[in-house]
Image (tube, helix red, strand yellow):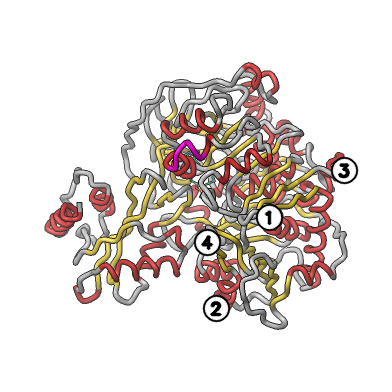
Amino acid sequence: MSKNITSVLHETRSFGPSDEFRKKAKISSVEEYQKLYRQSLDEPDKFWGDIANELHWFKSWDKTVDWNEPFVKWFVGGKTNPSYNALDYQIEQGRGDKVAFLFEGEPGDSKEITYTEMLIKVSKLANALKYRGIAKGDRVAIYMPMIPEAVIAMLACARIGATHSVVFGGFSAQALADRINDAEAKAVITADGGYRRGGVLPLKPAVDEALKICSSVDTVIVVERANNPIDMRKGRDFWYHDLVNNASDYCPAEELDSEHPLFILYTSGSTGTPKGVLHTVGGYQTYTYLTNKYVFDQKEEDVFWCTADVGWVTGHSYIAYGPMFNGVTQVIYEGTPNTPHFGRFWELVEKYKVNIFYTAPTAIRAFMKWGNEHVEKFDLSSLRLLGTVGEPINPEAWIWYREMIGKNNCPIVDTWWQTETGGIMLTTLPGAHDAKPGSAGLPFFGVEAAIVNAQAEELEDNEGGFLVIKRPWPSMIRTVYGDDERYKQTYFGEIPHVYFAGDGARRDEDGYYWIMGRVDDVVNVSGHRLGTMEVESALVAHSLVAEAAVVSRPDSLTGEAIVAFVSLEGGKEGSDDLVKELRDHVTKEIGAIAKPAEIRFSDALPKTRSGKIMRRLLRSIASGEEVKGDISTLEDKSVVEKLLKQAKIQK
Ligand code: WT7
């Protein structure tokens, strides 16, 4: 971890909600926020108990929170089911005929699914899983395009108490296999393929490839979506439509213990293989319910569109779960924002009269680049609230989002959180707070955040330090699946007695947090986390590569881009063909998101005398910055000179 973090961003503008927005908002003043925030910290049992009780429990809990650092339990002894809360409980409240999903396929096909129809579909698939011998406690991998069946699959697993592990459809067969094996999944739910960028992204062939090295799986359920040719292995592979046609349309929801494992979601860290972040039933449902309600100021008649893929945590918490617990109508779109034209998202906002729109800064920067004319063609007057997530947003993009998309009439919530936090931790509340472009805002209810140094000492306002959380909240990670020690080390091992997951930040004099990015070896490409280690291992696995060091450099579109420094076996020379081959190799090992933007060959890498690669130096070289700071520990200074010379030639 670097010792000093200097903040360079000085942004002084701020924007409050209109009187009209404020008047109708669920939380409409700073005082109201402060009162609830105080209560959430001073009387957590009462605060969280009341919130949890806004959802359905088969049996109430005996104890609200049980903290045995670093392990936490919430609503101990309670019994509930998130699938029941997302479906049956909504129908009980009169939302049976309300549309849950407005689905739009990339080719332009569309359909509506009501809450009652969702319950039937989820029940049928749950019964099909049971028929295939999947039971409470088993793990199921989900590898799907962005179609309603992805959410149906998640809720079907939850319904019977099977723990789902969604693997992003853009990950390779190898990455899928690693995740299936780590979780020892018994079944995979997938599709033949999905429509993406005007073509078909085949998924089932990747599953077949993965299963060659996975022995735990005996069932593959395949949704027919893109009609691409695939193989079906008898006895193992089943068409989704065949199974559900034969299944009964009601499946009672299992009464699950509050700490029953709901899902595993793999995410990258600075060391080792991806970590299986484990979330459990009761706390996760309570926190995603509450954050969705207040951060997005959800109203009964709202149409909500979160553009994330269910392969990431945003698609879990703010598509499959949080909004469902609030009985919201949502848009799901299968494809990319520029297919078949650059105004596709805005066309859908107009078509479905979207009121609340939640996306990532990298997407906003792409829209800016594509040009205003693609936005101006469509009527965006239905929008009333905008959100962002995934990485710090640059004020320029924030202002563009406000003016071009929000027409200066929609508050913007910049939401900071992580796979591990399960739900939004820092944000402004749209009807209460002024937003400052580039700041993620204030702690949400129950979140005791702080900026500290490595000894956990709190820093002054505006001093850069480590962002930590000082007490457990309901949707915090419970452990790294199968590895309690790694959990402890990663999140509670670096800074004593607080949760720390790798971001640097400062807090200003108004209490607003400004995220400065990761302080560990994690790259954030388009809002997706990748460990530099993983990319390095993929590169080194190639027979011609002797050593690799992966760093990030700033990128105006994706936030950060991956730069790989590679030295070859036997001092061989690199070539353009080899660059292509290595990029393809990383795509095959991990997925296209991990493909280096740049590969630079070097006969040696800068190392300390103890043999550690000096990534700090490489980062400066990759960003075209001057190489500053202490290089006295460097073993061979000529390596740096060579790399710098080479960088000049490339410019
Ligand atoms: C990392 C978590 C949370 C869902 C998407 C990413 C960065 C996330 C923000 C934000 C600045 C942000 C952090 C964090 N990040 N949201 N609003 N402002 N940075 O989930 O893959 O677990 O990544 O994304 O660096 O640690 P994730």
Mark 3 closeness class: few <14, some 14–19, many ≥20 residues within 10 Å: few
Residue at the extreme bottom of the image, as rendered: 234
Question: What is the spatial separation of the Cα atoms under label 2 and label 3, in whole angstroms?
Answer: 45 Å
Residue indicated by mark 1: 109
**Is residue 371 inside the magenta stretch?**
yes
Q: Residue at x 51, y 56 (%)?
A: 267
For this view, does 403 lie left or right of residue 357?
left
Which span is picked out in magenta?
370-374
Q: Residue at x 61, y 71 (%)?
A: 228
Q: SS of the residue at dot 3?
A: helix
Q: Position of residue 55 (x, y in %)?
A: 78, 41
Quarter of the figure with residue 290: top right
Mark 4 closeness class: few <14, some 14–19, many ≥20 residues within 10 Å: some
Mark 2 closeness class: few <14, some 14–19, many ≥20 residues within 10 Å: few
- Dominant SS in magenta: helix
Identify which residue, 416 or 249, lies in the foreground.
249
**Is residue 132 inside the magenta stretch?**
no
Identify which residue, 483 or 556, lies in the foreground.
556
Q: Amino acid at mark 1?
A: Asp
Q: Amino acid at mark 3?
A: Glu
Disc sitting over residue 170 in the figure: 4
Q: Are marks 2 and 1 in contact (CB under 8 Å)?
A: no
Mark 1 closeness class: few <14, some 14–19, many ≥20 residues within 10 Å: few
Question: What is the spatial separation of the Cα atoms under label 2 and label 4, in whole angstroms?
Answer: 19 Å
Q: Position of residue 536 (x, y in %)?
A: 36, 63
For this view, does 437 lie left or right of residue 208?
left
Examine the rendering and report whether any part of residue 627 can be seen: yes
Residue indicated by mark 2: 213
Disc sitting over residue 92 in the figure: 3
Disc with the residue nearer the chain's start (2 vs 4): 4
Disc with the residue nearer the chain's start (1 vs 3): 3
